[in-house]
Image (cartoon, helix red, strand yellow):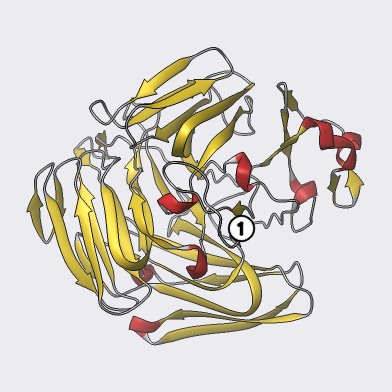
Amino acid sequence: MDLRPVFFVFLVLQFHLKLVSTEGFAEGPPLDSKGREFIFAIPGSSNSIPVIEVTSESHGVTEISVDQPAFERSYQQTISYGEVASFRLTSEAVARGAGFFDGAVVVYASKDVSVTCVVDTVAGTYADGFLAIPVDALDKEYYVVTYDTGETLNEFGHHQEHLSKFIITATQDNTRVSVELRTAATFNTLYQAGETIEFELRWKESAQIESSSDLTGSKVTASRAVALVAGNDCSDTLLVFRYCSYLVEQLPPVSTWGRSFVLANMDGRPGLVNTVDVWRILAPFPNTTLTFTDNHVTRVTVYDPIWYDYKLKTSKIVMLTADRAVMVVQYIAGGKSSASVLTVPTEQFTDSATAATTTTAGSEVKEYILVYRCAEESSLLVNEEPLRNLKDSERLREETYCAVTLGNEFQQDRE
């Protein structure tokens, strides 16, 4: 099995969350991915090493603490506006096996920061990561998105089974959690599709659920706000199961889903050939209509699979609109590696973003994709230079939105 390090960071990295309901947008205080308190646990596989990247989003000096309470470990650092602090944790911070887990990561900051978690391996053979959601943007209702799983052949020619998984972390004591499974899964014991798992978590305690099948569509409800991180220990988004990659995303609560999305496939990405992008669109509410600007329309109901996989194999932008709130996760495949990224609704686009380079030894940031309204291109700045003046940058356009591939010129600066 040949695993190659590929890690993508897609913009907008810092996004504005608007509160929505399943019937339409609801009024509420603005929430975003910047915050002063974060808590999450990391689903993983053997030899996984997490790196926590904390970026200052505030002027002046920001004091940061990254804690692993269960292991009595705490790391402190101070950074200035736009700087990045990197904290390489130990492998014990990654959950293994189905059941309760006490290794949650807690990040505190004296001023607003954004937090990225990158999961690497000891050998540096694969990496993926996620933008963490602050505690004040978490909620009580979630749906799980993972990907298809299966077997690969290891270096000895033996079949090796892989798992999809998700992990729930409590932000308060006495948190009651209910999980409605869409497929058979393990949590201390085996549960069948359609069964409900119920348990209680204390503050900073987590519970991981695993399956040899795709867990997409499983529903999580809690009595208090929780964090949900989901993925696969090794999945092949090309569905050949000759090569596979670790996939992980922190998933947003239903209250922050959206209805308008830009699907941008930038073909010819460095280090990749034969790229295929798949957007998994989770639409659990009955009779949701998905409309694509390439004239493809589909209706998703709760009686069919409650998700729809949309594929793009060429450089193109396609707009997706839904008549009810949906969640969209992009899976990128090419060559011998895959990655995943949460697709941000256009309702949550921000007016600035900071792109930070991961410092993991075995992974490399390949590129950034910046999505913006075409009409605003003349006013957009990258490193204080007009976006329109950038040379050798591939652009995609549709009627309203544009996308551009950016490299090192965007790192640790603002648009």
* Residue 315 against residue 62 in the figure, above or below: above
Left or right of residue 110, residue 240 in this image: left
In this rendering, position of residue 211 left or right of residue 306: left
Q: Quadrant of residue 188?
A: bottom left
Q: Nearer the viewer, residue 156 or 79?
A: 79
For the residue marked with disc 1, what is the amino acid?
Thr
User: Dividing the picture into quarters, in which one does residue 208 lie?
Assistant: bottom left
Structural crowding at the residue carrying mark 1, measured as other residues with C-alpha within 10 Å and reported as few (<14), some (14–19) or many (≥20): many
Q: Position of residue 69 (x, y in %)?
A: 38, 83
Along the horizontal axis of the image, is 254 left or right of 53? left
Residue 48 figure quarter: bottom left
Reply above or below: 366 against 54.
Answer: above
Residue 367 can be seen in this image: yes
Most foreground residue, 7 or 197 = 197
**Residue located at (21% from left, 69% from top):** 100
Q: Which residue corresponds to mark 1?
A: 358
Quarter of the rendering occupied by the N terminus: top left
State the image coordinates of residue 230 (x, y, percent, origin top left): 36, 51
Position of residue 408 measured from the top left corner of the image (x, y, whole percent): 75, 48
Q: Position of residue 288 (x, y in %)?
A: 39, 29
Q: From this viewpoint, which residue is outermost toward the bottom?
A: 72
Relative to residue 369, is residue 396 depicted above or below?
above
Q: Residue at x 30, y 27 (%)?
A: 301
